[in-house]
Image: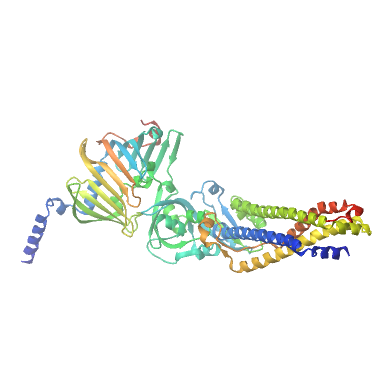
Amino acid sequence: MKITTTIIILALVFAAIPGSQVYSQELTATEIIQKATDKVNGKSSIGVMKMTVVRPSWSREVSMKSWSMGDEYYLILITDPVKDKGQTFLKRETDMWNWMPSISKMIKIPPSMMSQSWMGSDFTNDDLVKMNSYVNQYTHQILGEEVVEGLNCYKLELIPKPDAPVVWGKVLAWISKEEFYQLKLEFYDEDDVLINRQESSDIRQFSDRKLPAKMVMTPIDDPGNQTIIEITENDFNVDIKESFFSQQNMKKIR
Amino acid sequence: MIWSIAWRNVWRNKLRSMVVILATAIGLYGSLFMVALMNGMTQQKVDATIENEISDMQLHNPKFLEDESIEYAIADPGSISSFLESNDDVESFCLRSIATGMASTAHSGNGVMINGIDPAKERQVTAIHDKLTEGTYFEKASRIPSIVISYKLSEHLKSGVGKKIVLTTAALDGETAQGLYRVEGIFRTSNTAFDEMNVFILTGQLENMVAQDSTIVSEVAIRYQKDIDINQAKAALESEFPGLSVLTWKELAPTLMAIVGMMDQFGFILIMIILLALTFGIVNVMLMVIIERTRELGMLMAIGMNRGRVFRMIMLETIFMSITGAVIGVALSVTTIALTRRNGINFAAWSEGFEALGYNAHVFPVIETTFYFFLGIIVIIGAMLASIWPARKALKLQPAVAVRDET
């Protein structure tokens, strides 16, 4: 008798939430995060994007080309403006290098410089290196479901594991239920004060998959500041080897 | 005879003499007090730098000084420890491991020197544990290791006691190493630049972060007993450990020495300028004296006072006036310095500016006794020079003409 009541209640609950039939029963919070991370990375990719740094009194645009393999290897080439053209950034696992053709100098970005802003944006070097540590360094929990950008999303709470070297107190993530887009991320400090908000929108087709083409990073502390990244092209699962992500290649690549 | 005449002449026109005396007194009082303030500031800066930052002597691997990297450790710290322990001249010493890295919170990040310390030893060498404004100095044992940061850094990172800080540094193999820490204490010295750059963790934690289980000693800091000759101590250490760089505080902080030297000269120049200005005042007054007393001087010469005596009388008058002024000025500054020295002068309203330059805003004025002697000699020489022109003018008087002077 008791069991039947429970089943009926559960059935009613699930029926009441639209679109929850399959996924919510099968996926754990960690699996959702894993899928969302895989979605963005793929095995390898080549992309073209534009970054706009907005400041209260000025804004600036940087165009770049990027190559990636998993979430371990990145190579970014700046193509515009002319002043920064030819600059490359290489990320291998936890290390980062910067090649500056104007002074013919290769710099390994030291740990003490990791907190500096990347190309004057609201992202730090550290953000780029640690972009995808959400799976391993946090515990995940589903808080509920919300609609973001017109899509049904899981609202997840990510709490850093006790020993994990993570500065945030918690991270809230909104991940779409069907396609696992990371539509919104909110970063909180230890006092539950919102620090940064990252929002994605404008879902478009890129080679074999659909992805949000626009990402906006807003630091809450600095009103009027924003960094917008727009992806114009992205090819996934291209043929790149690990050896492509080398210091030699940083200087050669065009 | 001539001395008492000169002394009485000084007081014949009290108002005029008092003006010169007071000008000298106030000029010296002001400049002496300024010099005392500057002396106090530099002295405190030197003391604080030695006490909080660099100690009397430091040992390093010579390469560490070129590139402050954790990999340039001291090869055999054990032998240094036992050598220093058996040395009676050494008051205390401590071993540190040091790495450069980044301290970050959710709000911001800052490049820092990560000092891995042994708190029990460190307490005997530096005074950071006395400079805590909040929290404790490595007294708590919790699962997440402790870090002690400065007030300035915590302000910049928007951190506080009990908050998380992530340290990032390069491990011995060149890989990036990270660790999570909780702020246990917040310190504040009078040197903002030092504060902003330095964080303290347990040496074992830093070793864990960069290289699992090996002991690393990047720096040995030594405090000597009060009256030890630092250069002899240096020579002894150098002959004992030829492979290491041995640096005294003077070599570790050459800018500090430069500032001390500059302040000394600055004080000297200040006094000279003020005395020079005073000298012209005295010349002026003495010329007046000669003109006013033409008849009297003519009379003195007419009744047989020789030229040498007239010259000496004028010179003595000048010297008496300046010395009286100097004595009053010195007496005033000695009492003021003694009074203010007890509690110091607190420039709290400007402390931010003072501390940005590495000075303590609470200044205890101090001046060396020898400086007064030096000053006394300068005042007498100044007065003698100032009296030459008026005295010569007096000598040129023709007694026959002078006695008929109507002014």
Is residue B51 in sight in this rendering?
yes
Measured as percent of width and height from the top left, residue B121 is found at 52, 63
The N terminus of chain B sits in image quarter? bottom right
Evaluate whether residue A243 shows in this view: no
Position of B252 compared to A222: left or right?
A: right
Nearest to the observer: residue A166 or residue A26:
A166
Horizontally, is A54 left or right of B277 in the view? left
Give above or below for B341 relative to B68. Answer: below
Q: Residue B32: x and y, percent? A: 67, 60
Residue under the point 49% across and 55% down: B97
| Snapshot quadrant of residue A49 | top left
Where B108 falls versus B5 (above or below)? above
Q: Nearer the viewer, residue B293 or B237?
A: B293
Quarter holding the C terminus of chain B is bottom right
Decide which of B275, A231 is in the foreground and name it: B275
Q: Position of residue B71 (x, y in %)?
A: 49, 49
